[in-house]
Amino acid sequence: MTNFKPIQNKSMKKKVWDHALGILFPGANKILLKMKLTLCIILFSFLGAMATDLYSQTTKLSLDLKNTTVKDVLGAIENQSEFFFLYSEKIIDVNREVNIELRGSTIEKILDKIFAGTNVSYTVKGRQIVLTTPEANNFLGDSPTQQQKSISGKVTDSSGASLPGATVVVKGTTNGTITDANGNYSLSNNTENATLQFSFVGMKTQEVFVGNKTTINITMEEETVGIEEVVAIGYGTVRKSDLTGSVSSVKPEELVKRHPITMEQGLQGMAAGVQIIRTSGSPDGGTSVRIRGTATINNSAEPLYVVDGIMVGSNASFLNPNDIESIEVLKDASATAIYGARGANGVIMITTKKGSKGRANLTFDASFGLQNQNTTIDVANAEQFATAANNVAKNDGTAYNPIWANPSALNSFDWQKEMIRPSLMQQYNLSASGGSESTQAMMSIGYLGNEGIIRATNFKRLTARANISHNIKDFIHTGLNVSFMRSESQGSGNLMNYASLIPTMDTLSVGKLVNVPIKYPDGTWGHFPREGNGFNNGGEDNPIAVAETADGLNYTNRVLANAFVEIDLFKGLTFKSVGGINYTGKGDHTYQARNFRPFYYNPTDDLIMNQSSFMEYILENYLTYNLTFGKNRITALLGHSVTKGFSENINASSSDFAVNTLRTIGLSQAPETIFGGGGLGIDSREQSFFGRIIYSFADRYLLTATVRRDGSSNFGAGNKYGTFPSLSMGWRISEEGFMKDQNIFSNLKLRAGWGQTGNAGNATNLSVDQLSSNRIAYYLYNQTSNAFTIAPGLAQLSEIDTNLKWETNEQLNIGIDMGFMNNSLTFTADYFRRDAKDLLLYRGLRPSTGFTQIYTNAGQIRNSGLEFQIGYHKKWNDWDFNVNANATTLKNEAVDVGADIYSNNDVGSGAWWGSYSITRNGFPVGSYFGWRSDGIYQNQAEIDALNANAIAKGATKGAYQSIGTKPGDRKFKDLDGNGWVDDKDREIIGNGYPDLTYGLNISLSYKNFDFNMYFYGVAGQDILSYSYRNLVSFSTNNILADYATNAWNGEGSTNLYPRLTKQDLNHNGQISDAFILKGDFLKVQNVQLGYTFPKNLLSSVKMESARVFVSIENLMTISKYDIGDPEVGNGNVQQTGFDGGRYPFPQTWTFGFNFGF
Amino acid sequence: MIMKRIYFYNFLLVLSLVFSTSCSKDYLTVDRYDVIQPEALFSSEATIIQGLNGVYDMLYPDKKGVDIQQNWNFKPQMAFSNYPALDCQAMGWDNEFTRHDWRADKDMFEIGWLNCYRGVDRANRFIAKLKDADPAVFTNGETTKNIIMAEARAIRGFFYYYLAQNFGRIPMLAEGETFSNNPNKARAATVEETWNFVLEDFSFAAGILEWTPWKGEYGRITKGMAKAYMAQVYMYLKNYASAKKELKEIIDSQTYSLEPSYGTIHTENHWWARESIFEVAFPDFVDMGWGAADKTDALLWASCLTAAPSVGGWGALFISDEYVASFEPGDKRRKYSVVARGEMNPYTGQQMTNDVLVTAENMPNNYCMKQWKRVLYTEKIYYSQSCVWMRYAAVLLNYAECLFETVGDGADGDGHSGWYYLDLIRNRAWGNLEVALQPKFPNEPIPYNATSVVVPSAETFYKSNPHFSSYTADIKKVAVMNERRHEFLAEYSFWYDLVRTGIVSEYLDKEYPRNSGLSTNRQFTFQPFRTLYPIPYLEIIRNSLIGPENQNPGY
């Protein structure tokens, strides 16, 4: 059955809007006040810096120039101030020489002096000055016999903003004008058969035949991003047409439209070969990113992020998505080999926005999202649960819980509903950018406040950025990029935990049922019956009380800064030196108050504080040489890089405080509980040498060769260095002579590449022989003094492989790029085969070694697959239509990992799910390993027959499965055919890798309206649902409503659910294919409608642009999977497809606006 | 252009500086702040002793480990040595031991096995290096070196003993054998191979060590410990004569004596008392909540595991009604060991209900008080007590068994028969050693005997008791079994002794008749293969030299 998940039910909707009204109207609550304050602070601080209107009057300039051209004088003014000029050299004679000697003059005075005696007039608008002449406006036609007429109009950009400085020329003449500060122009004395040509840098030149028109308004379009686009690759850029590797470019503006919490979230479904799994719906937005599969077992499979040329590690969540200028995903080895030992999992290159010469602008955008629950798990209510529990007691012959004797009298809680609340997400971003000829700057600050939908959870993030570049000389360029992020988060949650909590806290008092509420009127919290009879879990607590009384905070401070100097040494030869720091400081504190709610209570209150920091220094120097001769074009790169990373952490705790408001470790009333720990972390250093040659002949034959040699302190003495080469080639068939005349392809390119990259894993000391003193001690007793002394000890705590070295990824890529209809339709396909060898992994050891694992190099994993990306762009009349679709197939296979590798993360000891994850040669990494189920035993005769056969074949345990098997228990298959079921009957029963991952983005605009839709889906995914297992196994937990009411209860009743039993002598809940569920899904991830205000409406409020939008994130999921959201995964490669529950993904209704000044 | 050239030369200078500083070959060598170079270990007596302490450390739980590792000395021990005998029962995950339905993938087997091998591995690494250590680094040269060697070998023997006792034939790792040079390892051909190896370790230790611990530091292995375990091994090998010799030497050394009051054997802050031959002490030096486990391993939460669920216990230890009813009148071990339904725990003042069966799983409503003498959670969670592995009482009972096996009803050189030694145990059990004794602890809630009482002679009692006489096994064996049963409730030996002496099947039939117990509803038929536990599943799937075909039969 397919569930079309509704957005929300009616009562929920009402709750959402009640909440919204509470927020949006006066007297509602503090949130509004907070929002206002935040907004005010942001605005004031920026507006102070951007007081543009007064600029021309307050700015005083001094010039002393002799026999200098007008052009140079204007340049000098631009250098000295923030003014910039817009003019056409066709109209203004800027080569005329002038003498200027003025001190402390206003711009007007200077301009009057420069253009004294000429017919040049000027308009000063803020920092922008437009120069024009009467001729430009009073054009005299070539032929006096033709009818002459005046034409005027307005030039705007695609967003509707006016475009000052655009050139308007009568085609075939030198006559024309440029638009004024409001984008208006006027040309008189035109002829009817003239054609006007409109041009502007970066925009498509447009021609309009005048005819009988008197008004011609033009919307300039940005130059089509075609194959001449430049893309960022490591340590440089390359013309897209020269690209031979597999690189996906993602338009940040598309991504930002979804208002993602992190850049990674927004990237979901946007690029072929890039799978993004949201690991959690928590307010900080956790994701797991896989580029071309999983090629490691114990190390991070996350890609490398390179931000403004600095390698920042495997996480870029500190970035404000609004600051991003471009995103390039380098997928194949020929693209990533330049990052050598860090490039194995692919590279995501991010360039942040920079200031540009010319127009200064200020943008402010704000959005307000209302979030609510999108997913619930349909579990039993108290009556259904207690009825089931009573049936369990009957079936097992065990005790009835007297409290549940009358199920209909119980107070029932829907814990999922109680723990989830509508919540507000707010985002504000303010950025300013601009610059002169020599200095450009961009500054931004952003604030994200996200209340989670689970009670008492929230996330706040403040980001600030300044990117400044400065040309010291015409051949020396410097720049500085600084970003800071502070985030704070509180609380956590897991929908599965609430779903599986017993739905009543009722108890008995003197034999009478007492309905226990969540909170009593006097403010005290209700709690579960304080008993240890096994009906409840003695450690279970009222989750609302836990959430509402929790006191804790996690914070992160992140600073990323880099400065560079770039020197053009000779023609084509450039040296660049980049120094950077990458700092992360983290901390948390937790105070746990005394409370006596759970049966197994903690007699003390505890305060725990942790802090840690990580610092990395990066220095990179490289030479780039560009050479063009004949039809040859060469770009060569040679460089060196060193990094040094170090960390430290400190933690402290104590217990027993006089009052519950103290948060000072030393104020404990039990000084013996004061504990301090921490220390210096593992130092990590790397040194690398790298080089690359990009060669193009006749724009047709392309070649890129890269090599990087990396050294790392992580590894054993003989294995510190590794070399990573790559080679790729391209053939632009469409440029060949024999293809010139065809009308099919506007672009056709074949690409093929091979290369190696590495994975150095995390900083480690597991390559050196070692002893540890970590909590190794014995206690010796002196009878005379009746006292103990601690005898400290040393021991080897890990099995060590001193030959530890890199993981090597070898990748082959074959791709084709096609463009049709002047690249309106583009198609890209890539085949890849990625072999990870010498995997760095914790190999499981036979426990008889005394160790469970060793960190070593072993084995090979292969990922292979196909990627498709198709784009279509069509514009007609007022319509603009864009569609981008991508799809990826992936086959993951452990080619050679030696002995099987098992894992049993995140399952309870009593669940019988040991070693559920297996990595075995010939199968995907982290496949599911278990028994095959074969329905439900319907009667005793069936069991007796199997038992008799088992005994006859020598089953010493005296049964086919268990001596406790009863009708209604789950039947398992005897795979080895020995007559009974035991450990040998486990096999690989599935894996969590989808056959196909796909994304679809559609955008449509009509006039000022724009509409966007994002779809994301996977097909052929099997989920190993531990959540489902727990909800169809009766323990001290709640179960699915369907299971509670439809469990097996007699022959023929069901073949799906086993009987209700808590003893589970048959182990119905053991790992088997009964818990593998279809996990295919299609998500309507985001729908957005926007409206851009027309320019003419905005000019009166001195605004350049304004847009408002509404969007819905996580609108709908179509899936058969109904145990929470089918998007499962926690980032651990051995748990691919494993569902143990998580923070639910909210549905977010967002309203927002964007203003540009 | 000239300017550019100057910049270019400057650039080359800077570049060469950068390269020359960063390319030094030591750049990639970093300091290690959290590990110690192993070379340092064997440089002095002090550090060598630290290495020995590292081997001793394996006697403690690993509070950073998984559940079973955190409960080492209690959970696997209780499960392997007691639950299958049904006097002690557990609910929840561990109930399968009480049902005789345990499987090879039970985590307890894996963790128990792993912990013992970790102990063996530490000892092996230490012993291998110690052999090469220069005697000159020790204050007393070879003598000190031998003492350290003896203690290390005895700990190795202890872990191998425990492995063989539970799993039978096991992989035997010699010194120098690690994963690197032996990725896979087969089981020993016979269990005797292990027993002989263990005997060598213990006899070496017994030959070197004194009766009192080295430097007066209790906690160290002593001659008494080594000999007591040697005797146990001999008994497994049915070499009762050798066992008897070792046990007699322990008795004659007069190093140990019975604790006058049975009730004080298991008491908080009662360390290395006169009856203790080997124990692991949990001095509980911090007084904290659950978070204490982040700080030290020497924490025991046995009281949480043993207390009644009605007052916060976790359901790991219920005592059967059959057991409670099995005592002779006057045997104070009943009152000292068990708080039964309807009774009050005299130490905590907590009243048990009258229900016969409690909890959702219908467990018997009786509890062991050996580790539950304080109200749970009120002040602290952890318990400052020792886990006593070997008591003098065990030596006496073993000696009695050896006498019976070697001379029947006959006497030893002192003119005492096995019955005499049973009577020693019974005399203390009836409280006769308490007479005129000042209570060790004030307000001893179970009053000491003021006067001597008459203790029925063991020989008379057992030979005349119809229940015990109905056993087909020799009455002497039955008598030793029954005394052990009452003496060692929830200690570490009863099930093993039942298995070793071959009386287990009959014991279950007599004491826990199928479907007709007092309240224990035994439904399973005893199957002999359950006298050995299975080789852990993980060992089988990770060790290519032990396949499913090499598993102990029945699993």
Image (spheres, coloured by chain):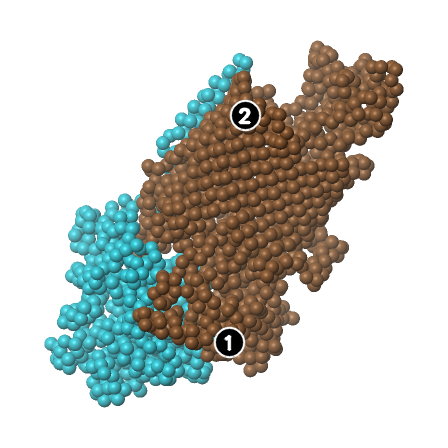
Chain colours: A brown, B cyan
- Indicate the secondary structure of the residue bearing disc 2: loop
**Amino acid, disc 2:** Arg
Q: Name the residue under label 2.
A: A700
* Residue at 31% from the left image edge and 76% from the top image edge: B526
Which amino acid type is marked by label 1? Gly
In the shown orientation, is residue A663 left or right of residue A115?
Answer: left
Q: Which chain carries label 2?
A: A
| Vertical side of B518 occupied by A943: above or below | above
Chain ID at mark 1: A
The numbered mark, 1 or 2, whose residue comes first in the sequence reads: 2
Q: How far from the left and from the top, in percent, is residue A95?
A: 72, 13
How many residues crowd around disc 1 within 10 Å: few (fewer than 14), some, or many (20 or more)? Answer: few
**Residue B388 x, y percent position in the rendering:** 30, 69
x, y percent for residue A150: 86, 23
- As drawn, the residue found furthest toward the left would be B413
Q: Do labels 1 and 2 share a chain?
A: yes
Q: Residue at x 48, y 77 (%)?
A: A395
Location of the C terminus of chain B by quadrant is bottom left
- Residue B327 lies left or right of residue A756; in this view the side is left
Instruction: Name the residue rendered at 50%, 24% in the picture.
Output: A695
The residue that disc 1 covers is A1050
Residue A836 figure quarter: top left
Give A270 or B443, whichever is nearer the viewer: A270
Q: Is residue A340 above or below residue B55?
A: above
> What is the x, y in percent for residue A763?
42, 43
Residue A558 visible in rendering? no
